[in-house]
Amino acid sequence: MSGMNNIDHNTSSQSDIDEIESLFHISVQPAALEVPRSVPPARKPSSPPRIPVSAPLLPPSFVSSSNQAFSTPVQSGPTPSTGAGFGGGPQYNTLTEPVRETLKRDLLRVATNLKDVVLPNPYREDPGKALRDWDLWGPFFFIIFLALTLSYSATENKSKVFAVVFATLSAGAIVLTLNVQLLGGSIIFFQSLSVLGYCLFPLDVSALVCQVNNTKLFRSLVVLVALAWSSWAAYPFVSTAVPSSRKALAVYPVLLLYITVGFLVLAND
Amino acid sequence: MAEEQYAHPGVCLFTVLFKFSALGFYIMCSIFIESFVIQFVVTVFLIALDFWTVKNVSGRILVGLRWWNEVDEQGQSVWHFESLDQQTLETLNKKDAWLFWWTLYLTPVAWVALGIVALIKFNFDYLLVVGVAIILNAANIVGFTKCRKDAKKQIQQFATSTLTSRMGNTIQSAFMSSV
């Protein structure tokens, strides 16, 4: 798959990027220096069939130690691109493709994460692993969307509503993550932030649906359903992260946060 | 100064563009746009774009550094800081690198100043925006500074290993020749 991406040879930055990419994987020892196979002395805008960029792709599996300034190349041949999505990971060697392609990949990652977190999936093996490639774009959009929707439907104090919702959600997510960590949880800070953000999706939907109909009963029902969905989605992640004796301590604040947001949605008129 | 041109003018442009438009929009927005909500969303969006550009595009192309985070099989979070090897680092354009580092360090200073202004004016809503800006800029600074440190460490290691290997060779050849 990776070799096919090299379609755009017309940008002069392609050569630099290829060069840079191939050099990222040159090991430190002078004896083992591979001459980068695509060394252009001058920047040719249209280069002959380039050796596929696949070689410099960095599969996450062999970067074993952290804080290593170099990734030593283990394989010389083209390596499959398994690094589909990590928090801003190294797969952007295909920068020659316009931003469109990167955007597409990011959107795909958001969609995958959303699906993993929110949709019912009885065959999900271990919820702790599901959001391994966390990203914060999804939660960012959901928080902004929710704040925007609530602010839009507010009749007065629009900016205050927006600011309050945004601040509550972001501060709440951070505090809840800290809570899980302090309870001896084994979840990673950003992963947990990501989960909490993605679980806002049902509440987003409910806020949108509540725009349609303004009767109290309808809104209560919608918010209740959304709340149940959010909590159901968030529960496995949070509960598996902490030791079982502390499960309630971790889960309760999450439920509380979502109930608060639910009230914000409900009370908006 | 004809010989010192920017090697990647497009990338430099975008690096600077998003930063300045975020700052500029924040400062000027109240003149043009009434609604705080729109101001907030647009500014934060520009800040996020700037963060992404600097981290993924400018860092790699202008100064040959990159950093990211991974979650490995055991569920541990692993931070990676990488830099190009010494030779390529020297071939990178100095002007590009100068621009990159200066804008990287100066922007959060500007945001802190704006934050102080907002604090004095009691505009706590705007402090949210400034908070987001500072957090994202600080993340980039920490990430790239760590890359730089690792680059320097690599250079030192490389130098010592070359030195020791060369000394070893010299000693060996001295032995051989004497024997």
Image: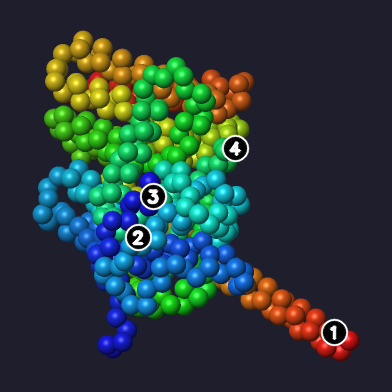
Q: Amino acid at mark 1?
A: Phe
Read off the chain for label 1: B
* N-term-proximal mark, 1 vs 4: 4
Q: Quadrant of residue B163?
A: bottom right
Circle 3 sits in a helix, a strand or a loop, which is it? Answer: helix
Colour pattern: rainbow
Q: Amino acid at mark 2?
A: Val
Circle 2 sits in a helix, a strand or a loop, which is it? Answer: helix
Mark closer to the observer (3, 4): 3
Q: Quadrant of residue A265?
A: top left
* N-term-proximal mark, 1 vs 2: 2
C-beta proximity under 8 Å, tags 3 and 1: no
- Alpha-carbon distance for marks 2 and 3? 19 Å
Circle 1 sits in a helix, a strand or a loop, which is it? Answer: helix
Labels in figure, total = 4
For mark 2, what is the residue?
Answer: B57
Q: Amino acid at mark 3?
A: Ser
Left or right, residue A259 beside residue A211: right
Residue B76 visible in rendering:
yes
For mark 3, what is the residue?
Answer: A2
Query: Residue B8, relative to residue A174: is it above or below?
Result: below
- Alpha-carbon distance for marks 1 and 4? 50 Å
Give a yes or no on whether discs 2 and 4 share a subunit: yes
Give a yes or no on whether discs 3 and 1 share a subunit: no
Tell me residue B70's x, y (percent).
50, 46
